[in-house]
Image (cartoon, rainbow, N blue to C red):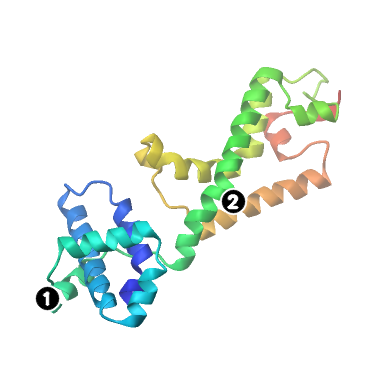
Amino acid sequence: MRDLAKAPAYQAELRRIPNENVESNRRKADALRKVMANSYREAQSTREGQQLLSGFPPDLRRDLEAAAQRYPQLSKDEVAEARRDLPPIPSTAAILLRGVAPMIGLPWLALAIFALVMAAILGTGPLFRAFEMSLQTHDGRKAGRVRCVVRAAVAWFPGVPLGLWFLAPFLGLRFLRVEPSLPLLLAMIVIAFAGLIYNLIRPERGIPDIIAGTYLMPA
């Protein structure tokens, strides 16, 4: 029952294995399927197990059935060996983090891209224009496109890595395939809020303005 309760995590890890033609990856995949097959067959022999299986989504039940068909007979030694070969299974907190990261990172990334495009084209975004604000340099001249883009990049930076980490597998960016940890996620949120608080204290010149060399002034 413990293995069956972990079936969603096993399924997720199985789908995350990039290439089963590699020996180490194939060993991990075989271990996951063997444990899934064993737990599925044992669950079918008990009423509690059948009830738990009935609550699983269809795709998870299909994966369990496929594993059981692939390994119809497993000895206790084979199951014990498979458990030893299991890859590290993330905790519930880590699994939730995988969902939180894209929920925060993707909208942040989309807004960051929009802000950069608007800064490159118009210098300031629609929000600044709505409040009739502009960006100027220390001598009172209108800030150039480069300064505006730098300011937007700094202002929206904290959420960009989260979005890129989530999109990395789909974009083929292997160097970004790193799981964002909870401390890193919290650190980025703290940095964002610290910047927000600083901007509230000094609305005329926040941290992005200091870095970009700009001043927020009435248009």
Residue 2 in view in this figure: yes
Q: Which residue sits at x=25%, y=62%?
A: 65
Q: Nearer the viewer, residue 144 or 101?
A: 101
- Above or below, 15 relative to 42: above
Q: Which residue is mark 1?
A: 75
Q: Position of residue 6 (x, y in %)?
A: 36, 70
**Which mark, residue 188?**
2
Q: Quadrant of residue 8?
A: bottom left
Q: Which residue sits at x=79%, y=36%?
A: 205
- Above or below, 11 relative to 147: below
Q: Decide which of tag 2 and tag 1 comes sooner along the chain.
A: 1
Q: Position of residue 181 (x, y in %)?
A: 48, 57
- Above or below, 116 relative to 41: above
Q: Nearer the viewer, residue 140 or 85?
A: 85
Residue 1 in view in this figure: no
Q: Position of residue 97 (x, y in %)?
A: 50, 58
- Above or below, 13 relative to 148: below
